[in-house]
């Protein structure tokens, strides 16, 4: 799916925020959450591709980015020692 630059920033923002909330934390801050969401979009797309899961449109891109952000948030918390409240 091809989104413009601002579309991916918007998806990254939402996916990063969702990743922080789903893992019951406050995230790593706005900029870090956006970054995790943007990189998470790539990671999530790769994971979905390896699993044979196809995604379409905004919702599919958001789902893939959120899965990727969750993976990155979990990895980030392993390295930073952050704990869930």
Image (tube, grey):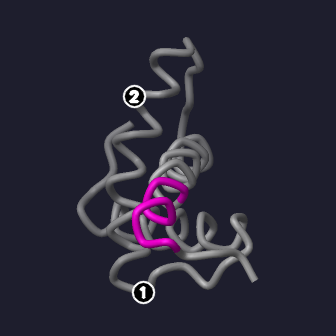
Which x, y percent locates residue 37? 43, 61
Residue at (34% x, 59% y) in the render = 38
Q: Nearer the viewer, residue 36 or 56?
A: 36
Q: Which residues are magenta?
A: 74-81
Q: As drawn, which residue projects farthest toward the front?
A: 81
Check the image and report above or below for 74 versus 18: above
Residue 11 in magenta stretch: no
For label 1, the SS is helix
Which x, y percent locates residue 33? 43, 74
- On the rendered structure, is 36 left or right of 69? left
Q: Earlier in the sequence, mark 1 or mark 2?
A: 1
Q: Nearer the viewer, residue 19 or 56?
A: 19
Q: Quadrant of the C terminus?
A: bottom right
- Image-quadrant location for residue 32: bottom left
Which x, y percent locates residue 77? 50, 65
For label 2, the SS is helix
Marks 1 and 2, Cα distance to the nearest angstrom? 24 Å
Please name the residue that numbered disc 2 is placed on.
Answer: 46
Which x, y percent locates residue 25? 66, 78
Please name the residue that numbered disc 1 is placed on.
Answer: 30
Residue at (56% x, 15% y) in the render = 51
Number of marks drawn: 2
Residue at (54% x, 70% y) in the render = 14
């Amino acid at each position: 799916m091809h989104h413009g630059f601002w579309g991916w920033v918007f998806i990254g923002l939402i996916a990063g925020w969702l990743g922080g909330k789903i893992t019951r934390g406050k995230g790593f801050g706005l900029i870090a959450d956006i970054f995790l969401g943007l990189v998470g979009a790539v990671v999530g797309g790769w994971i979905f591709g390896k699993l044979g899961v196809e995604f379409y449109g905004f919702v599919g891109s958001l789902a893939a980015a959120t899965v990727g952000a969750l993976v990155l948030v979990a990895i980030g918390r392993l390295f930073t020692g952050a704990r869930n409240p």
